[in-house]
Amino acid sequence: MIPAPRADVGTTPAALAPYIQHTLIEVGTTHDQIVAHAEETVRYGFSAAMVAGSWVTETAEVLRGTGVEVASALDFPTVGVTTSAGKAAEAESLVRAGAQQIDAGVQIGWLKSGRYDAFRDDIAGVVRAAGVPVKVMLELPLLTPQERDIAVELSIEAGAAYLKNASSGAVEVANPDSIAYLVARAPQGVRVKASGGIKSYPQALALLDAGAALLGTSAGVAIVTDQTSAATTSY
């Protein structure tokens, strides 16, 4: 379940769990690891299990009846390389397999080429095909200030449920400035997800204080148990 916008998450690391999308998207992930990941999502009370599309079916089976949702990403980790038709088809396929939320890459090159209609329609195609909340990965550090404003506006026009600062820590370590920027431009009904290198309780809390409604991280267990010194997540 996607939680309501934050009012007060309390003062303990464990209180952040409902705002965390527990992420496991790594090359070579095994079935046993996916099952353990899904079970952790339930055990710690995370918002959703974020997994690669190839593991959505198995994750949905583990989470059936728990009330915990399955999330997946498309056009990722290399953003902007999939055709619009391919993205829409994959979104539909993932939802049929059990995904209840989709994070989608955007066509940065089209935006930079001035192909604004195509950029918007690419996202809109995913939104229509999915029929579930779609979060757009905007890759803010790759954009000029003007491009950022245009990308946000077009994403909202396309029907995005969430604006997301970046796809991973390889692009941007999530920070309050980027989140506040998105929150200030999100109309009512559109929320913000923070993603990228979220490793600690203080960092996570700062992002929520900046207005994030969700946090995407593979260090969720370390964060909510306050054992973040060894966390090395980039997602």
Image (cartoon, grey):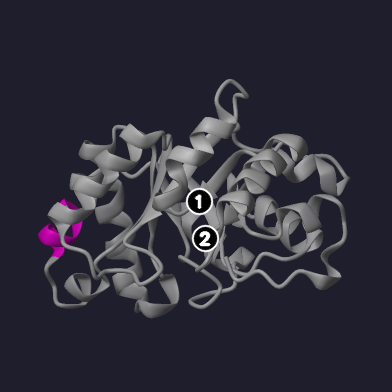
Where are the magenta residues, as a range?
116-121
Local secondary structure at mark 2: loop
Indicate yes or no whether the magenta region holds residue 117. yes
For disc 2, the neighbor class at 10 Å (few under 14, some 14 to 19, many from 20) is some
Q: Quadrant where the N terminus lies?
A: top right
Helix, strand or loop at mark 1: strand
Mark 1 residue type? Val
Q: Position of residue 25 (x, y in %)?
A: 52, 60
Depth order, front residue of 120/218:
218
Where residue 80 appears, x then y in whole percent? 27, 69
Q: Which residue is mark 2?
A: 25
Residue lying at 31% horizontally and 73% vertically, measured from the top left? 146
Q: How far apart are labels 1 and 2 at the CA level?
A: 5 Å
List x then y, in percent, for residue 190. Answer: 42, 41
Q: Determine the residue positioned at 25% across, 39% down.
A: 92
Q: Amino acid at mark 2?
A: Ile
The residue pinned by badge 1 equals 51
The quarter of the picture where residue 202 lies is: bottom right
Location of the C terminus (image quadrant)? bottom right
* Magenta span includes 53: no
Residue positioned 51% across, 68% down in the render: 168
Q: Quadrant of residue 2?
A: top right
Q: Can you say whether 114 is above or below 205 in the image? A: below
Is 212 displayed left or right of 204 in the figure? left
